[in-house]
Image (spheres, rainbow, N blue to C red):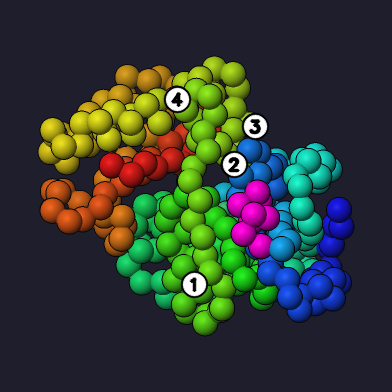
Amino acid sequence: MKVFTNAENLRQALMAQKDKKTIGFVPTMGALHKGHLSLVSQALSENDCAVVSIFVNPTQFDNAGDLKKYPRTLDKDVALLKTLQGTVYVFAPTANELYNNAIVSRHFNYGPIAKEMEGKHRDGHFDGVGTVVSLLLKAVNPNKAYFGQKDFQQLQIVKKLVELEKLSVKIIGCPIVREENGVAMSSRNKRLTKSQFEAATVISKTLKEVKDNFEKMSIPQLNALAKQRFKDNKHIELEYFEIANEATLKTVQRKRKGNKYRGFVAAFAGEVRLIDNMHL
Ligand code: PAF
């Protein structure tokens, strides 16, 4: 497996085989888990090769401590990718390399979808995501790029970014992969203690309970139920629970026929911020 730190070298290697070959791209921040591997497997099954980027992007963090503590496990990541069948290129640039020595965010007009949830709670986050995803897509020039639905809002933002930047890549959203106890897989789970990992099940359990009661109960009742479940849990601190229209990501107070809805959670286990969502 080839690990590239330089975009030009990666571009040349891909160009050398590009003619009849399609490229599936999986951007990651490393600390790979089964959720990432399912994205890479899908990329390999739908393309002739996969490129996996491993880059902890400084411009999308609004919290310096979180950036510093983000797990970095490149050797392990490469070893995991080697277990997959197929041609995988790893792109692991330095920040200066990828950003051409100017590590700052661009600003994007994504419209209303960027103003909800993560956009409200993480200042500048989606500008940082857009900046790095745009740089990565231009470096890799893939046919398709794969993003997990755990970051459902990010997936919509990336689709908008591709429209704004007029990039010719198809963005594919892939299902959330969960741990046996229901916790959505995330690189941040590596920072949880055993008891926090167990306590974090309140997130997916609550989303499931809201899903199971979605027809029977009103949105205010469901919001109250969810908040109560988090109040009852001493180890997990809720940042937000929202039921939103899946297309617009706008928080809703009542259901309307024909619309699709999704429940969204952000919560803290100690210092570790976890997010999850579920179609209702
Ligand atoms: O979802 C992530 O891991 C990151 O936000 C991404 C898309 C790799 C950009 O840094």
Relative side of 280 to 21, left or right: left
> Could you give the CA–CA distance between mark 2 and mark 4, rounded to whole angstroms?
17 Å
Using the image as rendered, state which of residue 188 and residue 19 is in the foreground. 19
Q: Is residue 238 above or below residue 159?
A: above
Region rendered in magenta: 40-47
Compare marks 4 and 1 and give the one earlier in the sequence. 1
Q: Quadrant of the C terminus?
A: top left
* Helix, strand or loop at mark 2: helix
Decide if residue 67 is in sight here.
no
Compare marks 4 and 3 and give the one earlier in the sequence. 3
Q: Residues within 10 Å of mark 4 (few under 14, many from 20)?
A: some
> Could you give the CA–CA distance between mark 1 and mark 3, rounded to whole angstroms?
30 Å
**Residue occupied by mark 1:** 161
* Helix, strand or loop at mark 1: helix
**Res 227 label:** none
* Helix, strand or loop at mark 3: helix
Compare marks 1 and 3 and give the one earlier in the sequence. 1
Majority SS type along the magenta span = helix
**Res 35 label:** 2
Residue visible at 49% across and 56% down in the picture: 173
